[in-house]
Amino acid sequence: MNKKEAIDLLHSKVKNLNLRKHCYAVAAVMKSLANHFGEDEELWETVGLLHDADYEETKSDPQKHTILLTEWLKEKGEVSPEILSAILSHNYAHTGQNPPKNNLEWSLYCCDELTGFIVAVTLVRPEKDISKVSVENILSKWNSKSFAAGVKREQIEMCKEKLGIKLSEFVEIALRAMQEIHEDLGL
């Protein structure tokens, strides 16, 4: 599946514009992480675009999240074990299946929550402009557990152990990627 096909599928399944923007953000970060690791940027970006495409239909039953999406992908002829495994690994905490095992899967697992945290930091700033946000701004909110309380920081922090990337560098990679697509994010 290429990027255009992934966007078409995302738009056909996801009506919520904020959820679409989340998928765009994760896709941008995944593309940057692929570049960091010298991997296939389009494949990683595609995984980022698709990772939550079934969320609107599965949000009331989290154990079905990613399972339904992989069924849709297979119906469309997607057989890449790399894509299917990465999608499934994204929700292993609920399904108990397919824990992340490589840089692609751990990158998705760690950056998913981080994109929401970066958006939250952006939205509390007076100008609400992601181009004005710095790594320091993000890290200054990190230990405030009441800020963006739903964000699973421990999931993001696994970037050091699982990817060999320090938290500050991981935040920088994600922030820069999101700043590059600020118009798509409305930030």
Image (tube, rainbow, N blue to C red):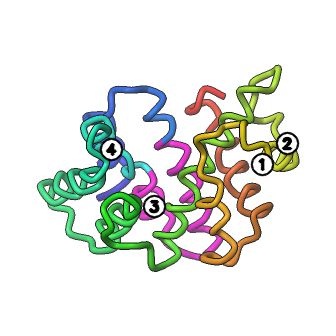
Query: Looking at the rendered structure, which numbered label has been put on residue 88?
Result: none
Residue flagged by tag 1: what amino acid is it? Trp
Q: Is residue 58 left or right of residue 99?
A: left
Q: CA distance from mark 2 to mark 4?
A: 30 Å
Mark 2 near mark 1, Cβ–Cβ under 8 Å? no
Query: Looking at the rendered structure, which numbered label has been put on residue 137?
Result: 2
Residue flagged by tag 4: what amino acid is it? Ala
Q: Residue at x 48, y 29 (%)?
A: 18
Q: Please give the range of residues in magenta.
A: 23-48
Q: Is residue 62 left or right of residue 162?
A: left
Above or below 77: residue 176 = above
Q: CA distance from mark 3 to mark 1?
A: 30 Å
Dot in front, 3 or 2: 2
Residue flagged by tag 2: what amino acid is it? Asn
Q: Give the labeled residue for mark 3.
A: 42
Dot in front, 4 or 1: 1
Q: Is residue 124 left or right of residue 50?
A: right
